Amino acid sequence: MCAVEVLATELPRGPFPMRRPAVLLAVVLLLLSTAFITYRIIWLRYPLFPPSPEKAWLLDMEARVRSHRGETTVMIAFPGGDEKQIIAEERIYSGALGFNLLREGLNQVGVWSGVVDPGGEIIGYRATILMIPPPSARPIPPTLGPYPAQLGEGDRTLARRLVAAWDRVPPRARLQVVAATATDVWAEPLPNPQDIEAWSALRKKIGRREALLLLLRAANLPARSVEGLRLSESVTTGPLSWIEAWTGKEWEKLHPETGEIYPKSISFLHLVVGGLPSIRISNGEISEVRWALNQQIISQWRTHFERIKRSSGLLDRWSLFRLPAEFQATFRILLLVPIGALMICLLRNIVGFPTFGIFMPVLMALAFRNTGLLYGLGIFSGVILLGYGVRRSIDRLRLLLVPRLSVILTLVIVSFTVFALIGNKVGLRQFMAVGLLPFVILTMTIERFFIITEETGIHEALRTAAGSAAVAAITYVILHLEPLQLTFFVYPELLLTVAALQVLLGRYTGYRLSEFIRFRKFRNPT
């Protein structure tokens, strides 16, 4: 085999000469990224589009407490959260009173205690309630509770006789016929008239709510008494009460006096379940109670933050949402730096943009987030041109490399200081943020600009400076995209996809787009 044939067999073929290790590595990275994201979406119920807004409710409670004498204790039930909602950002206002948050079964209770001033104390509670879709899994049905202890065996037997004819009716229909009895409407077959008369007397004795709960228990329908608020923008002086009955698939809500079944379009916020009052006080009185609900539109950034804090999933426990709040904003930006590096690979190797160095545009783009794009580009250009002038002036001094770079570095810092003073004088915050520009990178850029000017001319140096500024501007636009920041923060596995694309771009050896323009005359020699 001749030398030409040997060389031909060893030269890469095509714009993407793929070696098997590079392809395998890119495929593995893509598969890992896809697997992690699929796990989050399907099993952990992450949304496909995290930046989309969601509805939330701001709950605000305020009351005045007065004491008779001695220590006063106030107990107020608050939302405890369930599978349909997350309680976030709770704030307590207690004045001079002590406060504790307790759990009583399914209920969350705030307890204020202490000696109240003669003028009274203002207490309050505020929380953001995030509404989330219910889980797709079938809920666990509740157990059938006991009969109320205060009712005798005769009352229980009467209730069982009244509903005995409806035992084989489906739960939903059984609930409807039991609820209708609250307004003295009895379904066929009608019970014994004597039993109906005895039931009317018992209902007057124990109240309509307890009577309806008793009939639901006799009909083998788990039921509970609830106090809470209707989810609508409103201000009220006290919570509502209703009854919830389990029909085999979900809790149906009934009016405790009329037995009316509320439509599913009406939503409620639970405060206390089980018949306890939502507000209890000992050795004092409470007045001027005000409950307010206002709707808010928030991003799923906050929704994920609150949900993941309470999750026990493996990836949730190692999520970036677990970081302290002051560090999360930093990582939202850092996670996009690889995207900026990918853009540099694309713009340099595929398009053909000339730049000063490899990662200088990314660092400049990060700095532009504080100065703004236009001000940042202006400051960048001004410092480069000023530094170039000084570099030409000190060239005749024949300084060594390190002292020469030290002089330029000092010049860059002096320029930053002057810009900051000018910004303070004219009220431009962008000029005062120049201290965040990467001064070491600017120092090396000035040196590189001078060298290119000496070797290939000022035209080539300006072209490289313009290319660097363009790449930095494009990278800045990408880093500034809020939805992209959030997407990478929620799905950091996307970095594996970025790495796979970087590996594939690293195998590109074809023509750049700029070279097609530069050598276009060779394609049409005539």
Image (cartoon, grey):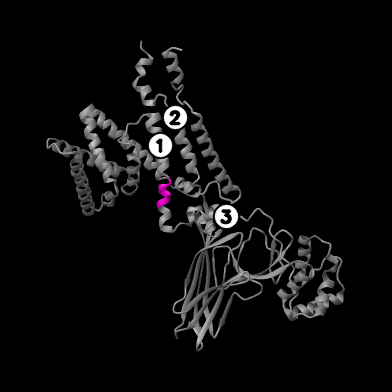
- Residue 10 is left or right of residue 429, and the answer is right
Residue 26 included in the magenta stretch of the image: no
**Which labelled disc corresponds to residue 391?**
none
Packing grade of label 1 (10 A; few <14, some 14-19, many >=20) is: many
Packing grade of label 3 (10 A; few <14, some 14-19, many >=20) is: few
Q: Is residue 50 above or below residue 22?
A: below
Q: Quadrant of residue 250?
A: bottom right
- What is the distance, in whole Å, between disc 1 and disc 3 at their CAs? 34 Å
Q: Is residue 378 visible?
A: no
Residue furthest front in the image = 1
Residue ID for mark 3:
313
Label 1 vs label 3, nearer the camera: 3
Label 1: element kind = helix
Q: Which residues are magenta?
A: 330-335
Dot 1 or dot 3, earlier in sequence: 3
Residue 333 included in the magenta stretch of the image: yes
**Which labelled disc corresponds to residue 343?**
1
Q: Amino acid at mark 1?
A: Met
Name the quarter where the C terminus is drawn.
top left
Question: Residue 375 or 365: which is nearer the viewer?
Answer: 365
Residue ID for mark 2:
507
- What is the distance, in whole Å, between disc 2 and disc 3 at their CAs? 38 Å
Q: Quadrant of residue 176?
A: bottom right
Dot 2 or dot 3, earlier in sequence: 3
Q: Main secondary structure of the magenta part?
A: helix
Q: Amino acid at mark 3?
A: Gly
Residue 340 in picture, x, y percent from top left: 40, 40
Question: Residue 287 or 167: which is nearer the viewer?
Answer: 167
Label 1 vs label 2, nearer the camera: 2
